[in-house]
Amino acid sequence: MSRETLPFPTSSIPPLEPYLPPPSSIPATNPSQNPSPKIHLTLTYATSLDASLSLSPGTRTMLSGPHSKAMTHYLRTRHDAILVGCTTAIVDNPALNSRLETISSLDQQPRPVILDPKGRWDFDEDSQVIRLAAEWKGKGPWVVVGRGLEGEENLKERGELLERVGGRSVMVEGGGEVINSLLAEPENRWVDSVIVTVAPTWLGKGGVVVSPPRREGQQPQLRLRDVSWQPHGEDVVLCGRILRD
Ligand SMILES: NC(=O)C1=CN([C@@H]2O[C@H](COP(=O)(O)OP(=O)(O)OC[C@H]3O[C@@H](n4cnc5c(N)ncnc54)[C@H](O)[C@@H]3O)[C@@H](O)[C@H]2O)C=CC1
Ligand SMILES: Nc1nc(O)c(N)c(N[C@@H]2O[C@H](COP(=O)(O)O)[C@@H](O)[C@H]2O)n1
């Protein structure tokens, strides 16, 4: 399959910067900017106006236009790892590398991480991530089997996993189950920032929807703070940080 290279104007970078981890060479020292200084987790995905990521779990659906797609590929260069659930890996056969036209070294690529507790992802040399790693256009994937990410002790494990990947930042792209599980964490400790592409379309009922469980009792509903809305072509990119109590 031919793969395009994507132009991303440098003028689009400064508005994204407050929501990104510091560049890898700079230690994360400002606790007010990054309350979990070891690992920065950015949640980033593209959604329709009716909160769908795709037409159905078994379908790859292109929502981002060319500008916001290039923005996502810029984000990929700014994180040490890129994480998806195994259904996304199976259905989309994603490349999970950055195809920005400015890429000149494998060091600029994120490490793909596939969450696959039951070992469902049946990869081979035709899998994009494997092929691209063989071509030095992406890093070889890590597959996380056997455990979920939820729970107190696994917060620690998350840090250990990412340190082993060799980094301090991860962007989570999806799919729905992964995103909803992260947003369900009751004390909002997981997600540091959110960068969502909103495409001007409705996918209709039956899609894979981002809709975490409603919080009951006295708990405030999940909400973003420090929000900015940035137009990228016909899409809007919503950036924010999770409001922590
Ligand atoms: N528009 C967008 O930006 C994106 C769209 N998608 C779309 O999403 C759809 C797939 O989404 P889903 O069906 O919801 O599947 P998913 O991609 O979230 O994968 C679900 C699987 O991941 C594992 N998993 C999920 N949460 C986990 C956790 N907390 N810990 C450990 N393992 C966990 C489980 O094995 C689960 O069966 C596809 O149609 C894909 O095209 C995927 C990524 C981004
Ligand atoms: N940013 C964004 N916009 C869309 O419209 C999408 N469908 C996705 N999907 C995510 O990107 C992965 C595909 O990546 P490659 O182009 O193959 O590298 C896909 O698996 C989803 O994680 N993202």
Image (cartoon, rainbow, N blue to C red):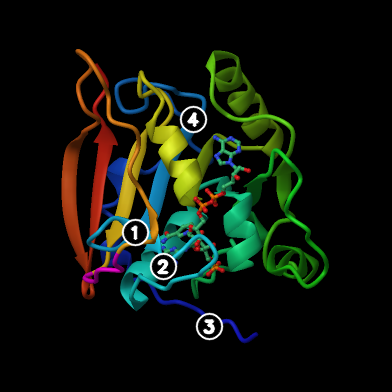
> Where does the magenta region start and end?
200-204
Which part of the image, by quadrant, shows the N terminus?
bottom right
| Residue 100 image position (x, y, % from top left) | 49, 71
- The residue carrying mark 4 is 27
Whether pointer 4 and pointer 2 mark residues with C-beta atoms closer than 8 Å, the reply is no
Residue 23 is at least partly visible in this image: no
Q: Is mark 2 within 8 Å of ligand 1?
A: yes
Indicate whether 120 appears above or below 92. above
Count how many numbered circles sit on residues in the image: 4
- The residue carrying mark 3 is 4
Q: Disc 4 versus disc 2: distance between alpha carbons? A: 40 Å
- The residue carrying mark 2 is 55
- The residue carrying mark 1 is 52
Q: The disc labelled 4 sits on which kind of residue? A: Pro
| Residue 111 image position (x, y, % from top left) | 64, 50
Dot 3 alpha-carbon crowd within 10 angstroms: few under 14, some 14 to 19, many 20 or more = few
Q: Quadrant of residue 149?
A: top right
Q: The disc labelled 2 sits on which kind of residue? A: Leu
Q: Disc 4 versus disc 3: distance between alpha carbons? A: 33 Å
**Circle 3 SS class:** loop
- Whichever of callouts 3 and 1 sits on the residue coming sooner in the sequence is 3
| Residue 45 image position (x, y, % from top left) | 39, 55
Q: Examine the structure image and report whether residue 197 is included in the region drawn in magenta.
A: no
Q: The disc labelled 3 sits on which kind of residue? A: Glu
Dot 2 alpha-carbon crowd within 10 angstroms: few under 14, some 14 to 19, many 20 or more = some
- Camera-nearest label, 4 or 2: 2
**Circle 4 SS class:** loop
Q: Is residue 242 left or right of residue 228?
A: right
Q: Quadrant of residue 22?
A: top left
Dot 1 alpha-carbon crowd within 10 angstroms: few under 14, some 14 to 19, many 20 or more = many
Which part of the image, by quadrant, shows the C terminus?
top left
